Amino acid sequence: MEQRLFDDFKKPEPKAWQNQIIKELKGKPIEELNWKIAGVEGKPFYTEEDLPSSLPQLQIPNHQAEALGIRNWVNYQVIEVETEKTANEKALSALNQGATGILFGLKSVPNFDILLKDILLDYCHIAFEIKNDSEALLNSFEAYVKVKGADENEARGFIRSNESPVLSKLPNFRFFLSEEKHENANLGLAILLGKTIDVIDHKTKSVEEAEAWLKQLQFNLNVGESYFLEIARHRALRILVAQLANSYGFELALNDIQISSSSGQWKEPTKDEYNYLLRATTEAMTAIIGGTDAVIIQPFHHLFPKNPAQGERIARNISTILKDESYLDKTLDPSAGSYYIESLTAQLVEKSWAILQEIEEKGGLKNLSETDINALAL
């Protein structure tokens, strides 16, 4: 017979919590405890009554669960390419020491035979960042994959560029589409969706083409310092992209939506620069708990100017520690059912979608000035 340990305790009602808070405040109005941050409003406490009527199902098992665990994310090592040979050596070392993806920073289209020598595309993700020549870079990489006889489905990663997005012939190679950091979280998500709509409307003429594009966009969030809000932002973005797909007339599976999470550059003023290490850890935690598919932590080069390899190793090991020592890879959606986070998620989805509708009613982002866009958050 199952013994329920808490049956003897009466379930507290929200009114009881409220009365206790009022008592503790000694005459001050309870409304003083309400808060607002980044355009999101909150209360002093949450109960089951604050849960949305239907909870999002964000539990997405890893498709390679036996090999990589039930919950997996790509741990990207950022490598700036000075020479292909040196970058290749650093990449191989990083992959042998915990990285599961490499993000190469490029100045021009490289010699892939040298840059990717001995790197097995089946076992890691490869991404590239380049200001210009993105189409030439993509064509060259696709040709390399074909010549090497690699499985095109196993070429996974993305390309980041300032240029117009390009659709890859490789089914799982994506174009990086990042949010612009904004003080208002709702507006930031709405702008990212607005950028997505501009891409799809410009590049496609059919529902099938729109679906192909949405499946090959890598959505990126720049992670901030507000812990629970960042968890909710990641969850909300996945829901919003699925809603966007529905608006185009098709359903997009949640595991077809790829989200990456990028840390800052560690250049902001601080009393103790080693706080950046703690910030990077908590930022990575919020992204992982929120359901990210990839973590990109910038190396701490300026903290270790005499030993840049140490700055790279620490950045790489943060994700490894969160997986191997904190076991964040054991639970699919650890924030599921949280009164607070579910409420924040629902609020972000509702407000961001409303702002997006305003943007589209005005003709899309391309027709709005910065002043017009900022006014939408008011």
Image (spheres, grey):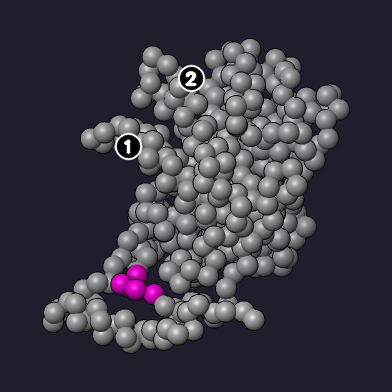
In which quadrant will I find the C terminus?
bottom left
Kindly indicate the quadrant of the structure image that contains residue 253. bottom right
Q: Which residue is mark 2?
A: 309
- Which numbered dot is residue 366? none
Residue type pointed to by label 1? Asn
x and y percentages locating residue 154 in the rendered image: 77, 38
How far across and down, in percent of the image, does residue 338 sit? 48, 68
Q: Residue at 83% across / 30% down in the picture? A: 150
The stretch drawn in magenta includes residue 304: no
Q: From this view, report whether residue 339 is shown above or below residue 125.
A: below
Distance in Å between CA atoms under marks 1 and 2: 19 Å
The reply to whether residue 27 is visible in this rendering is: yes
Above or below, comparing residue 88 to residue 224 in the picture:
above
Q: Nearer the viewer, residue 66 or 3?
A: 3
Q: Which residue is mark 1?
A: 275
In magenta, the rendered stretch is: 42-46
Give the vertical position of 178 relative to 235 (above or below). above
Q: Residue at x 54, y 29 (%)?
A: 78
In the image, taking residue 24 as reference, residue 88 lies left or right, namely right
| Type of amino acid at the residue the image marks with label 2 | Ala
